[in-house]
Image: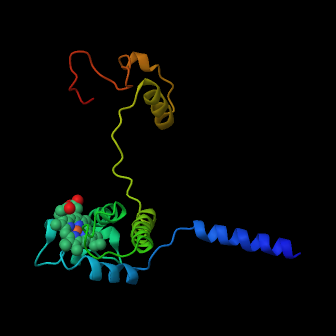
Amino acid sequence: MMKRLILVVFFAGLASAQSTVRSSVREQQALINQYCLGCHNERLKSGGVTLTKLDLDHPSSTAELAEKVIKKVRAGLMPPAGLPRPDEAQMKAFAAGLESEIDDAAAADPNPGRPSLHRLNRFEYANSVRDLLGLEIDPAQFLPVDDSSHRRTFPGSEENPC
Ligand code: HEC
């Protein structure tokens, strides 16, 4: 019985050690205030970067900047060498917290981009005519041979939009 209990405690410990620690928005803001804003403020804008605009509550609205911050902090490049910096665990938790907030926002509001335009090939054309008009046609009578990318092209008139 005791042995089993020890095992359970042991594995619970392992599991929690493996899950990533993520700092809260408040902790992230405190870290930036203490270690970054001395240089990245509106007046100095070191490296052309001001972190006063980084919206930690909605980091996806300034995602590009947030990504840069994550990269610099993960690589240990910011704060610059020789200056006071948070300990390793704090830096990791900071980057992980910021990253998960961006990822969560992206997952909640995916932007798949615009659908790409696509010309029907012979097979699709025949199917569309059948579906729309109920007619079985032989597309070879109407359309030239599909090229290798399955687009209809007209010999000598590549620009023809038909
Ligand atoms: C002592 C001043 C100083 C402090 C403190 C400092 N930085 Fe910087 N930072 C710079 C300078 C100078 C540059 C431009 C040179 C470079 O990119 O290394 C820079 C560049 C950057 C960049 C721009 C990278 C790019 O790709 O354009 C980011 C992001 C950044 N810092 C984030 C941070 C973060 C986050 C902190 C705090 C954890 C921090 N910095 C603390 C001086 C500082």
> 139 or 54: which is nearer to us?
54
> 150 or 41: which is nearer to us?
41
Q: Residue at x 20, y 26 (%)?
A: 159
The quadrant holding residue 121 is top left
> 28 or 153: which is nearer to us?
28
Q: What is the quadrant of the N terminus in the image? A: bottom right
Q: In the rendering, at what x and y percent does residue 161 appear?
A: 24, 30
109 relative to 161 in the view: left or right:
right
Q: In the rendering, at what x and y percent does residue 70 appear?
A: 34, 64
Q: Residue at x 37, y 62 (%)?
A: 74
> 132 or 4: which is nearer to us?
4
140 relative to 47 in the view: left or right:
right
Q: Residue furthest front?
A: 82
Q: In the rendering, at what x and y percent does residue 129 appear?
A: 45, 31
Instruction: Report how many numbered discs are placed on residues in the image.
Output: 0
36 relative to 76 in the view: left or right:
left
Q: Is residue 155 above or below residue 136?
A: above
Image-quarter location of ligand 1: bottom left
Q: Is residue 143 above or below residue 57?
A: above
